[in-house]
Amino acid sequence: MDLSSLSDGELLASFLNGNERAFAELYSRRHLEIYRFILNYVHGDEDLASDMFQETFIKVHNHAHTLLERDNVRSWMYTIARNNCLNCLKRLKRQVRLGAQHENGQDEDQLAPDEALDRSAMHQALDRAIQALPANQREAVILREFEGMSYAEIAEATHTNIGVIRQRLWRAKQTLRTVLAERFENRPAGESE
């Protein structure tokens, strides 16, 4: 059977019927995006992200039988990851810095030095601005902009409704726009921190 053609829900059902290869396929399909989400959620702390990532997939494996709606496997996995992160951060009572890791369309090595410096300053400013957002807005931005989730998927993963998600994203974008505009509008061209 070609597992790659199955939906996430079909893979989970096959796994529950004893096909361990189906779980391996689901892991292979979703592990990078779940890890990236967790890494962003814990602000770039790679050690903590690795722990939360392992814990997430252990829970997905051990609790697969509890998912009632097989159409929502991806959102369910994000919910588990999110809850693990929230619980861990509460336990540790700490916030870690958002990493400066961004997926760029252009390699930093190919930029002129002043362009690379400007881009780096903008990324750092964006990281700080995202970090400063209220937790629910920061979460919505990460899920939408970094993970590419739809409003419906975000609403499901965060146990809220689409209207609330739209409002959180609108407010977050307004805040980011204001913070970044204030930071960069009065700066002479080519000047960076």
Image (cartoon, grey):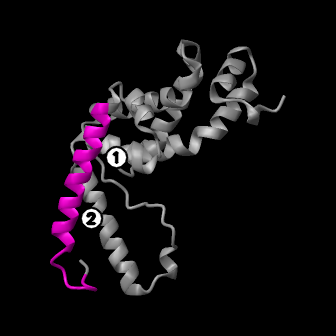
Give x and y (percent) for residue 98.
33, 53
**Residue 185 painted magenta:** yes
Which of pointers 2 and 1 lies earlier in the amino acid sequence?
2
The residue that mark 2 highlights is: 125
Q: Name the front one of labels 2 and 1.
A: 1
- State the residue position of label 1: 141
Query: Residue 186 falls in which quadrant of the image?
Result: bottom left
Magenta-colored span = 163-191
Disc 1 residue crowd, few under 14, some 14–19, many 20+, Cα 10 Å: many
Q: Is mark 1 on a helix, strand or loop?
A: helix
> Which residue is rendered at x = 34% and y = 46% of the image?
141
The quarter of the image holding the N terminus is top right
Kind of residue at disc 1:
Val
Frontmost residue, 21 versus 72: 72
Kindly identify the residue that appears in the image at 21 percent across and 42 percent down: 134
Amino acid type, label 2: Ala
Give left or right: position of 174 versus 80. left
Query: Which residue is found at the position 70% from the left and 32% from the top?
Result: 24
Magenta stretch, overall SS: helix
Say if 115 sits above or below 1 in the image.
Answer: below
Residue 79 on the magenta span? no
Q: Which residue is drawn at 45% across and 36% down?
A: 52
Q: Residue 129 is drawn in which quadrant?
A: bottom left
Indicate the position of residue 130 as horizontal and vertical percent values. Answer: 28, 53
Task: Rate crowding at label 2 as few (under 14), some (14 to 19) or many (20 or more) other CA atoms within 10 Å.
Answer: some
Q: Where is residue 18 in the image (x, y as percent from the top left)?
A: 74, 16
| Rendering quarter of residue 121 | bottom left
* Left or right of residue 57, residue 93 in this image: left
Do the residues bearing badges 2 and 1 touch, measured as CB atoms within 8 Å?
no
Quadrant in which the C terminus appears: bottom left
Q: Position of residue 94 (x, y in %)?
A: 25, 41
191 left or right of 70?
left
